[in-house]
Image (tube, helix red, strand yellow):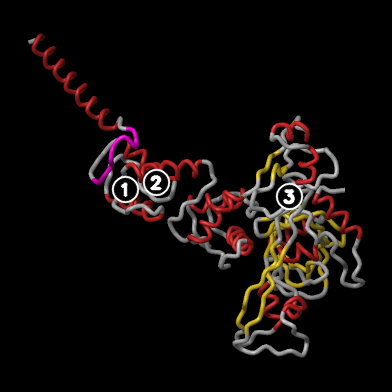
C-alpha cells in the first residue's frame, strides 16, 4: 500500500512538473520572437499589452491573452503609424512599437490616439504636459488633467507654430510637438561645482560662446541655472533662448455683426491702437460685416531664467503684455512666501490692471499683504500659458471694478519690466526693483 502511494505521488509530481514546464514555455516567449495574433497567449503578449497600455492604446489588464481588446489596440496603433491595419503583431509592427515605446520612455515623443481637449484626464494628457514642459510651454505639475493651464499652453504653442489656434491637441498639434523636439535647442542644467569653463570643455565649445548664447555678463553661474549649449541648426541665427527677438505675423479675420475695433482687440489680446494701425483705421472708421481685417499675432520667445525659482524678465511693451493679454486668468505666486492665487487681467495699457478671480483668491492675497490692502510693492511670479514671468504687484483696490462677488472693490496693479504709471506715463522705480528681484537680475 505504501509503495503504491509513493508511485501515485511520484506520478502526480511528474505531471505537475511537465504541466509547469509547458506553462513556462508558453509564457517564456520574448516579444518579437514570433508573430502574434488573435487567440494566442504568452509572456510576449503580456509585454505587448504593457507597451500598448503605456502608449494609451490598451486600457484593460495585461493578461497575456491576445483577445479582441489587444487586436483592436494593435489595429489602432497600426493606423496611427502608417502600417497595414491587420491586427497582427509581426516584425514591422513590433519594430515600430518598440521604437515608439522607447521614445515614450524618454518622454520625448507623443503618439496620436485621440483628440485631447479641456476636461480630459489620461496618461496621454500627462505625456502631453511633459512634452510641453520640456519645450518651455508648461510650468505646472504634470497631473494628467487637461485643465485651463494645459489648454492655454497648447494655444500658446499653436500660435508660435502657426497652427490653427483652438487649444485642442489633435493630430496636427501633436505632430508639431514631435517635430519641435527634433528642432529644439540643447540645454544644460548647472550642477554644484560646475564652472562655465568645465561646461565648455564638456560640450566642446568656449566660455565666450556660452556667455553669448545665454546673454551672460560674467562667468558667474548658479546650480539649477539652465544654459543653452548650442543653437539648433534651424534657428536662423538665433543665438539663445533670450536673444531671439519677438516677431509678428498676421491672421485674417472676418468682421461679424456687433464687432467693434475695441471688442476685436480685446478678444485677440492686442491693443486697439495696434489693430487700427495694422488696418489703416482711425477713430472715425467703421467696420462692415463681412469685411476682412488683419490681426497682428505676437510671437514671444521664452527667455532663459537665472534659476528655476525666478521668472522671465520680459519687457512690458514688446513682450509681457502679449503673453498676459486682457481677459486671461493667471496664477500669481508671491516670490517670498510661495502662496498662489488667481488674477484676471481686465484692462490696462501702461501696465496690467487686474482683479482677483474669486473671494477665495482675494482672501489669500490679503493674507500675503499682512491682512490689509496696501500700495506696498511685492515681487511676484505670473504663471500664464505655461510660462513664469517676473513682475511686481500692489494690492490696493481702486477705480474700475469688473468682477463682482470677489470681495475686492476695484482693480489692482501689476507691473513688468519698463511698464509705467497711468498718471504720468513714468516708470515707478519701486515696482522696477521688485520686478528685478522676481527675475533675479541686478
Q: Main secondary structure of the magenta part?
A: loop
Say what secondary structure mark 3 lies in: loop
User: What residue is drawn where x is 31% and y is 34%?
Assistant: 33
- Which residue position is annotated with label 3? 240
Badge 1: residue crowd in 10 Å (few <14, some 14–19, many ≥20): many
Residue 317, horizontal then vertical, whole percent: 80, 66
How far is the residue under mark 2 from the one under mark 3?
Answer: 38 Å
The magenta-colored residue range is 30-38
In the depicted view, which residue is nearer to us: 80 or 362?
80
In the depicted view, which residue is nearer to us: 219 or 140?
219
Badge 3: residue crowd in 10 Å (few <14, some 14–19, many ≥20): many
From the image, state whether disc 2 or disc 3 is nearer to you.
3
Say what secondary structure mark 2 lies in: helix
| Residue 31 painted magenta | yes
Give whichever of discs 1 and 3 has the lower sequence position: 1
As drawn, the label of residue 407 is none
- Which residue position is annotated with label 1? 70
- Could you tell me which quadrant the N terminus lies in? top left
Say what secondary structure mark 1 lies in: helix
**Does residue 75 lie above or below 6 as drawn?**
below
Residue 209 left/right relative to 432: left
The answer to whether any part of residue 436 appears in the image is yes
How far is the residue under mark 1 from the one under mark 3?
Answer: 46 Å
Residue 385 left/right relative to 198: left
Residue 27 left/right relative to 422: left
- Which residue position is annotated with label 2? 52
Badge 2: residue crowd in 10 Å (few <14, some 14–19, many ≥20): many
Amino acid at each position: 500500500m505504501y509503495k503504491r502511494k509513493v508511485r501515485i505521488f511520484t506520478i502526480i509530481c511528474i505531471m505537475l512538473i511537465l504541466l509547469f514546464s509547458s506553462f513556462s514555455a508558453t509564457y517564456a516567449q520574448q516579444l518579437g520572437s514570433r508573430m502574434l495574433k488573435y487567440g494566442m497567449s504568452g509572456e510576449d503578449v503580456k509585454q505587448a499589452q504593457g507597451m500598448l497600455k503605456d502608449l494609451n492604446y490598451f486600457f484593460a489588464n495585461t493578461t497575456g491573452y491576445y483577445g479582441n481588446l489587444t487586436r483592436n489596440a494593435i489595429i489602432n496603433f497600426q493606423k496611427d503609424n502608417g502600417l497595414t491595419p491587420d491586427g497582427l503583431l509581426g516584425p514591422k509592427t513590433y519594430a515600430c512599437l518598440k521604437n515608439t515605446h522607447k521614445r515614450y520612455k524618454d518622454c520625448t515623443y507623443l503618439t496620436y490616439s485621440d483628440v485631447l481637449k479641456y476636461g480630459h484626464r489620461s496618461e496621454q494628457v500627462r505625456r502631453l504636459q511633459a512634452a510641453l514642459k520640456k519645450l518651455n510651454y508648461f510650468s505646472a505639475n504634470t497631473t494628467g488633467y487637461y485643465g485651463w493651464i494645459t489648454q492655454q499652453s497648447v494655444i500658446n504653442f499653436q500660435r508660435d507654430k502657426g497652427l490653427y489656434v483652438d487649444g485642442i491637441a489633435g493630430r496636427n498639434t501633436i505632430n508639431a510637438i514631435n517635430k519641435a523636439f527634433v528642432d529644439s535647442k540643447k540645454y544644460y542644467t548647472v550642477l554644484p561645482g560646475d564652472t562655465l569653463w568645465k561646461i565648455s570643455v564638456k560640450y566642446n565649445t568656449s566660455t565666450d560662446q556660452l556667455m553669448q548664447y545665454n546673454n551672460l555678463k560674467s562667468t558667474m553661474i548658479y546650480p539649477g541655472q539652465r544654459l543653452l549649449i548650442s543653437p539648433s541648426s534651424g534657428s536662423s541665427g538665433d543665438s539663445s533662448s533670450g536673444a531671439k527677438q519677438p516677431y509678428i505675423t498676421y491672421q485674417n479675420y472676418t468682421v461679424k455683426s456687433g464687432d467693434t475695433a475695441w471688442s476685436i482687440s480685446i478678444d485677440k489680446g492686442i491693443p486697439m491702437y495696434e489693430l487700427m494701425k495694422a488696418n489703416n483705421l482711425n477713430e472715425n472708421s467703421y467696420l462692415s460685416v463681412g469685411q476682412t481685417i488683419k490681426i497682428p499675432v505676437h510671437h514671444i520667445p521664452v527667455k532663459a531664467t537665472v534659476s528655476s525659482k525666478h521668472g522671465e524678465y520680459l519687457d512690458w511693451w514688446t513682450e509681457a503684455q502679449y503673453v498676459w493679454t486682457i481677459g486671461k486668468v493667471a496664477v500669481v505666486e508671491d516670490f517670498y512666501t510661495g502662496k498662489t492665487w488667481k488674477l484676471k487681467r481686465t484692462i490696462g495699457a501702461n501696465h496690467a490692471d487686474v482683479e482677483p478671480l474669486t473671494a477665495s483668491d482675494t482672501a489669500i492675497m490679503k493674507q500675503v499683504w499682512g491682512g490689509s490692502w496696501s500700495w506696498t510693492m511685492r515681487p511676484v511670479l505670473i504663471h500664464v500659458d505655461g510660462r513664469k514671468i517676473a513682475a511686481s504687484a500692489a494690492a490696493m483696490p481702486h477705480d474700475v471694478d469688473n468682477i463682482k462677488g470677489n470681495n475686492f472693490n476695484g482693480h489692482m496693479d501689476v507691473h513688468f519690466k519698463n511698464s509705467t504709471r497711468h498718471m504720468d506715463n513714468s516708470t515707478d522705480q519701486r515696482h522696477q526693483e521688485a520686478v528685478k528681484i522676481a527675475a533675479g537680475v541686478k
